[in-house]
Image (spheres, rainbow, N blue to C red):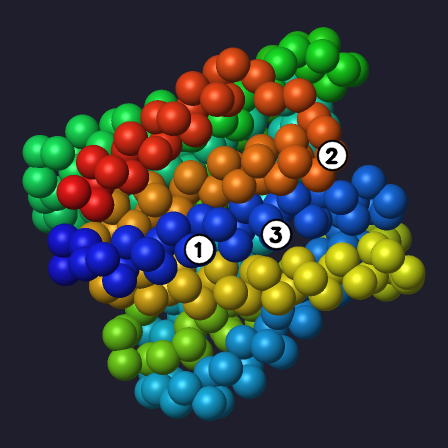
Amino acid sequence: MIGSPAAQGLALASATSFGISDFVGGVASRRVAALRVVLVSTPVSMVMLGILALIGGGRVTTAAVVLGMLGGLSQALGIWSFYAAMAAGPISVVSPLAAVVDASVPVCIGRILGERPGLLASAGIAVALGAVVLISWHSGDGGATRQGLTRGVVWLTVASGVALGLNFVFLDRTPADAGLWPLLFARGAATVLVIAVAGLSRNLRVPTGTPLRLAFVVALLDTAANVTMLFALQLSLLSLASVLISLYPAATVILAVAVLRERVRPRQVAGMVLAAVAVAMITG
């Protein structure tokens, strides 16, 4: 259970899928409101997970339903808090702070639950946390970064990291014989929340054209990311799998540089090098 090669591969596959999904979603959100993109991707992902759950089978228990729904709600609330924090405060602080809290929560809870990775893996976790900060740290340009870091922004940022980190914990505690049913209930709860928020904010409109097509791509990537995440958590320690999955910003940055020709910063290069070192330490 410490971390088989299969579990490590699944965790890195999940990180890659999450990173690509964030990139595609970001591109779509440049054309329409992000909430309208999620309004499509979340329920479509729910349908995909429902089909996979039916094919894969598994026992639908109270634990699978409750923990799955809690995971879906925590993930949806975490993403909302993250966007709200970035809109109100300096991105250069919000992004890395949320990322390190997100990665730290399952590590701390794993310790409380009695997980004891080896010395090399523990050092790799520390290196990975540093890598996440460096990769996701933006430079201070643009209007958002000139805003002050108020107490409200700090609370939103920390709340985002805690909620996203708890998503790992809830899914990790789901019964192993439940198959993919917890993911279906997670997406179901998130779908209800997204539709409610979209209605209240007057964004209850499905995008058209390219944003709509990109939203379907996001749904496919999100489905793949969540399936591989669940299997990685089941086959490995919570602390190890969650940290590997939290390296997803690396894929987003690489795509931003390759596709959008965005300038990669020295600290991000250093972060990706550290990420490679961390993966080698954890998988070693």
Is residue 169 toward the left or the right of residue 20 in the image?
Answer: left
Q: Mark 3 points at which residue?
A: 21
Residue type at the position of mark 2 = Leu
**Residue positioned 76% across, 57% down in the render:** 214
Q: Mark 2 points at which residue?
A: 260
Identify the mark nearer the N-term, 3 or 1. Answer: 1
**Residue positioned 27% across, 59% down in the render:** 7
Category of crowding for the residue at label 3, using alpha-carbon neighbours closer than 10 angstroms: few (below 14), some (14–19), many (at least 20): many
Is label 1 in a helix, a strand or a loop? helix
Identify the mark nearer the N-term, 2 or 1. Answer: 1
- Is 189 situated above or below 125? below
Residue type at the position of mark 1 = Ser
Q: Give how far apart the Cα atoms at labels 3 and 1 are.
A: 10 Å
Residue type at the position of mark 3 = Ser
Q: Position of residue 239 (x, y in %)?
A: 25, 45
| Nearer to us in this view, 107 or 166 | 107
| Nearer to us in this view, 74 or 106 | 106
**Residue positioned 35% across, 26% down in the render:** 274
Q: Mark 1 points at which residue?
A: 14
Identify the mark nearer the N-term, 2 or 3. Answer: 3
Query: Between tags 2 and 1, which lies in front?
Result: 2
